[in-house]
């Protein structure tokens, strides 16, 4: 079997958007779900959403904490998603910096190579002029 390649249109920015959308979906769903599975600690959907946001962002104030087993399972999913989100965002930003640096260096190298090629053409023409028989 051949090696599977990543699609050419997969960029750091797109990966960041995808993981961002997934994280947003998980945080909204978990905030709503937390209201259902741990309604004593999360009496409103708003309190569940507040908890999800602070957990996803790893702030974790501790003012809202799930106490039921189901709530803790939801919390585990949110925590892992938050770690994945922060990891991908950090990697995406790093990749953008690396790509920008690579492009800058590449354009400088191209200009230098173009300059060298032009200069060699000039030298070649001058040598042909000097070596041509004189009338």
Image: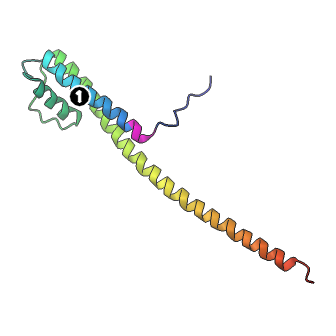
Above or below: residue 2 compared with residue 98: above
Residue 44 lies in what quarter of the image? top left
* Drawn side of residue 90 relative to residue 45, left or right: right
Residue for point 49% across, 37% down: 9
Residue 86 belongs to magenta span: no
Q: Which residue is mark 1?
A: 27
- Horizontal and vertical percent position of residue 8: 52, 37
Residue 14 belongs to magenta span: yes
Residue 20 lies in what quarter of the image? top left
Above or below: residue 98 compared with residue 79: below
Residue for point 31% across, 31% down: 21
Which of the image's four quarters has the N terminus?
Answer: top right
* Drawn side of residue 114 relative to residue 79, left or right: right
Which of the image's four quarters has the C terminus?
Answer: bottom right
- Horizontal and vertical percent position of residue 93: 37, 46
- Horizontal and vertical percent position of residue 32: 17, 22
* Drawn side of residue 12 relative to residue 85, left or right: right
Local secondary structure at mark 1: helix
* Drawn side of residue 79 relative to residue 63, left or right: right
Q: Main secondary structure of the magenta part?
A: helix
The region drawn magenta spans: 11-15
């Amino acid at each position: 079997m051949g090696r599977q390649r990543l699609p050419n249109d997969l960029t750091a920015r797109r990966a960041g958007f995808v993981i961002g959308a997934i994280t947003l979906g998980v945080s909204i769903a978990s905030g709503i779900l937390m209201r259902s599975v741990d309604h004593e600690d999360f009496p409103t959907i708003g309190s569940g959403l507040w908890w999800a946001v602070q957990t996803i962002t790893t702030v974790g104030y501790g003012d809202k904490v799930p106490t039921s087993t189901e709530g803790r399972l939801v919390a585990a999913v949110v925590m892992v998603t938050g770690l994945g989100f922060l990891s991908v965002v950090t990697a995406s930003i790093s990749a953008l910096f690396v790509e920008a640096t690579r492009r800058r260096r590449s354009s400088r190298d191209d200009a230098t190579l173009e300059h060298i090629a032009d200069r060699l053409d000039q030298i070649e023409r001058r040598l042909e002029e000097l070596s041509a028989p004189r009338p």
